[in-house]
Image (cartoon, rainbow, N blue to C red):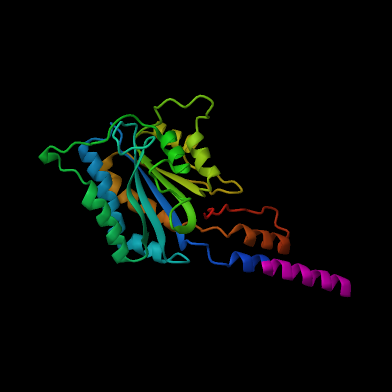
Amino acid sequence: MKSMRSRAGIGLVAILALFAVTAQPAAAGTAVDIELALLVDVSGSINEVEFNQQINGYVNAFKDSDVISAIGDGAKGSIAVSMYFWANNANTNFTDYVYQVVGWTEVNSAATGLTFANLIDDELVLNPSSGDINPYGGSTPIQGAMNTLAVDGSGLVGFADNTFDGVNIVDVSGDGSNNVAIPTGKSTDFGRDALVDAGVYQINGLVIGSSSIVDYYEDYVITSNSSTTKAGFVQNISSFNDFSSAIKSKLIREIGGVVPLPAAAWLGLGMLGGLGVIRKVRRKKHV
């Protein structure tokens, strides 16, 4: 009996040590509940009115008290968010289909939500009555854009090299399926695979259009449940007129999702209870 108690005590010490390691602050990163990358479709199918409806939808969402409350309800009460445009366009601001238009910003209050909203509003809203047109355009390279974000393409600051530490989530919005040729040797969902391999925990979609586009997002864009990912979801609206309310509810759903335990914590629980499934959540590497 004494021997068994001794072994149990040693095991408990090992488990507590694992949790102690888990509890250490992340190196050189501000701790947040999630790091949220917003990938916004600005391809040629998006006209000037629709462009503004998207941008104004995001502006209104980050000013909204319900969104700010959802952020405040998190364990840390804070998120980091960045906005990227994606399209297949020769515009020199784009690097391999992606252009980062608003850098990583911490949002943890109504004031910081307003700051992020203003960063979008001040730079991006078009004025069609003055002759403004969608300056981007081109085709719809969903997979290429996701792949570029995953590998932190030249000129981009993605998950690996920002100054925050949290669960990585990608929010993709668009009105079409991928229509840019898949590179030789790559799978149909190579962009999603690249993000998952880079440690993204969840990818969700907001589809503006038909059920066939929803099917594409469900099959090739969002994540499924696995040992390192959470099942994503697709929200569908029929027109850009509904974008503002849709992106608000989508953000609340994303922000309010269950934040996973770090890998070491799951390992400790598995040792204690003999769990059948141990979920390991890949953490961002710090340089």
* In magenta segment, residue 14: yes
The image shows residue 185 at horizontal and vertical percentages of 54, 26
The image shows residue 271 at horizontal and vertical percentages of 72, 61
Q: Which residue in the rendered view is the most extreme toward the left?
A: 130
Q: Is residue 155 visible?
A: yes
The number of numbered discs placed on residues in the rendered structure image is 0
* In magenta segment, residue 228: no
Q: Is residue 1 visible?
A: no
The residue under the point 50% across, 43% down is 195
Q: Which residue in the rendered view is the most extreme toward the bottom?
A: 2
Q: In the picture shown, does residue 74 fall above or below 225?
A: below
The residue under the point 40% across, 27% down is 180
Q: Quadrant of the N terminus?
A: bottom right
> In the picture, residue 137 is in which quadrant?
top left
* Foreground pick, 167 / 123: 123
The image shows residue 30 at horizontal and vertical percentages of 45, 63
User: As drawn, is 148 to the left or to the right of 90?
Assistant: right
Chief SS of the magenta region:
helix
* Foreground pick, 121 / 59: 121
> In the picture, residue 20 is in which quadrant?
bottom right
* Foreground pick, 234 / 261: 261
The image shows residue 61 at horizontal and vertical percentages of 30, 55
The residue under the point 28% across, 60% down is 115
Q: Which stretch is magenta?
A: 1-17
